[in-house]
Image: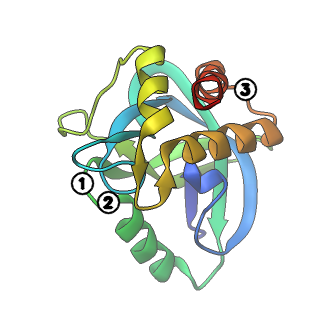
Amino acid sequence: MSMWVFGYGSLLWNPGFEVAEQVIATLPDYARSFCMRSIHHRGTVEDPGLVLALDEQAGEACEGVALRVVAGQEAQTLAYLRERELISSAYVEKELAVRLSDGREVTALVYVIDEAHNQYCGGLPLEEQAQIMAQAVGGRGPNSEYLYNTADHLATLGLHDPALEWLATRVREIDS
């Protein structure tokens, strides 16, 4: 059985593992949002940034990509993803059904936000999110870089996320 991973943020442009197949996919009942404070990769404990997470919301849907892991590399990919995504335990690892754009339905490994975790910050106004992302920097670089890369890759894939597009435009205005 194939291992699939659902990407909705940095996995779109930096999966970090060898991908055998990439297909546009939809995850029902979750919304992509900047609802997680980043204290490692895109901010610090003293000056947190924001990163994307999947917030469980009935009736919503997140469009992203399903990434099929190369056969034989499942164990090392899982270990890599756990080290990368579970760095602060703000994400919860789940296996959820996703619909592929070609009509298939697969079970994919998905990292969703733990709303009880202290890094959860759902519902921040977009302007506040933009102000945070314009100045935060973490171990993997500026928060704005993460935003721009994600927005650019969603656009390249033909996926429309109005809030993310607004944020990218607004942070570029603040940065200029």
Please name whichever residue, 97 or 54, is drawn nearer the observer in this view of the structure. Answer: 54
Q: Which residue sits at x=41%, y=30%?
A: 132
Circle number at residue 160: 3
| Tags 1 and 3 touching, CB below 8 Å | no
Residue 172 higher or lower than 166, as above or below: below
For mark 1, give the secondary structure: loop
In this rendering, does residue 113 appear at all?
Answer: yes
Q: Quadrant of residue 73?
A: bottom right
Q: Quadrant of residue 124?
A: top left
Q: CA distance from mark 1 to mark 2?
A: 5 Å
| Tags 1 and 2 touching, CB below 8 Å | yes
Name, please, the residue furthest toward the front.
Answer: 176
Circle number at residue 86: 2
Q: Which residue sits at x=24%, y=54%?
A: 89
Q: CA distance from mark 1 to mark 3?
A: 29 Å
**On the rendered structure, is 49 left or right of 76?**
left
Residue 90: percent from left, percent from top: 27, 47
| Amino acid of disc 3 | His
In this rendering, does residue 8 appear at all?
Answer: no
Please name whichever residue, 39 or 16, is drawn nearer the observer in this view of the structure. Answer: 39
Residue 140 higher or lower than 146, as above or below: below
Q: Quadrant of residue 144?
A: top right
Residue at mark 1: 89
Query: Which one is earlier in the sequence, the residue at label 1 or at label 3?
Result: 1
For mark 2, give the secondary structure: loop
| Amino acid of disc 1 | Ser
